[in-house]
C-alpha cells in the first residue's frame, strides 16, 4: 500500500525534477555548444537530457529504495534495469491463503447444494404424497 503511494508521488516528482534539470542545462547552453546529436536545437537537447536524467535516476534510485525498504540488493544492473533474485519467500503463505479460500468456497457450495437437495426432496415428497392421495392418472 505504501509502495504504491511512494510510486504515485515519486515518479511524477522525479519526472518534474528531470525536466527542470534538463531545462536548466538546455537554457544555459550556448547555441554553438549544443552537441550534434541534439541537431543544434535547445528543445531536442532538453528532451534528451530529461530522458537521460529520468532514466539514470530511476536506474539508481529503484535499487536504493528497494534496498532500504526490503533489504534486498539487485543481482545485476544493466541498461535494461535492475535484475533481482527470484525468491520464493512467501510462496507457502500464498498457497495456504489460496487453499483456505478455496476450501471455504467449497464448504459454502456444499452447504448450498445440501439445502437445494433438501428442498427438492421435500418437493418430491409433496408430489408423491399428492399422487398417492389423488391417484395417479
Image (cartoon, rainbow, N blue to C red):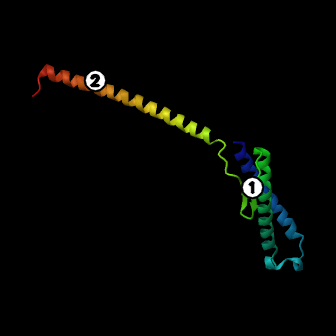
Kindly state the secondary structure of the residue where label 1 is placed: loop
| Nearer-the-camera pick, 99 or 105 | 99
> Does 9 appear above or below 105?
below
Q: Residue furthest top?
A: 133
Kindly state the secondary structure of the residue where label 2 is placed: helix
Residue in the picture at 78% in, 61% down = 54
> Does 41 appear above or below 76?
below
Write down the residue under mark 2: 122
Binning the other alpha carbons within 10 Å of mark 2 as few (below 14), some (14 to 19) or many (20 upward) gives few
Residue in the picture at 67% in, 43% down = 89
| Nearer-the-camera pick, 36 or 112 | 112
> Does 137 appear above or below 2?
above
- Looking at the image, residue 3 sits to the left or right of residue 32; the answer is left
Occupied quadrant, residue 59: bottom right
User: What quarter of the picture does the N terminus occupy?
Assistant: top right
Residue in the picture at 76% in, 53% down = 62
Write down the residue under mark 1: 75
| Nearer-the-camera pick, 25 or 60 | 60
- Residue 111 in the image: state x and y as whole percent: 41, 28
Residue in the picture at 79% in, 54% down = 61
Numbered marks: total:
2
- Are discs 2 and 1 less than 8 Å apart at CB? no
- Residue 76 in the image: state x and y as whole percent: 75, 58
Occupied quadrant, residue 90: top right
In the rendered structure, which disc, 2 or 1, sits on the residue that comes first in sequence? Answer: 1
Query: In front: mark 2 or mark 1?
Result: 1
Amino acid at each position: 500500500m505504501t509502495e504504491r503511494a511512494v510510486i504515485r508521488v515519486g515518479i511524477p516528482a522525479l519526472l518534474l525534477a528531470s525536466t527542470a534539470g534538463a531545462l536548466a542545462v538546455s537554457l544555459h547552453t550556448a547555441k554553438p555548444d549544443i552537441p550534434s546529436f541534439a541537431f543544434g536545437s535547445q528543445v531536442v537537447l532538453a528532451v534528451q537530457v530529461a530522458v537521460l536524467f529520468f532514466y539514470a535516476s530511476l536506474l539508481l534510485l529503484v535499487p536504493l529504495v528497494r534496498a532500504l525498504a526490503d533489504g534486498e540488493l539487485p543481482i545485476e544492473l544493466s541498461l535494461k534495469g535492475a535484475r533481482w533474485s527470484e525468491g520464493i519467500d512467501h510462496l507457502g503463505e500464498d498457497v495456504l491463503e489460496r487453499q483456505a479460500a478455496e476450501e471455504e468456497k467449497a464448504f459454502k457450495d456444499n452447504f448450498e447444494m445440501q439445502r437445494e437437495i433438501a428442498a427438492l426432496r421435500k418437493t418430491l415428497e409433496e408430489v408423491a404424497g399428492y399422487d398417492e392421495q389423488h391417484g395417479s392418472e
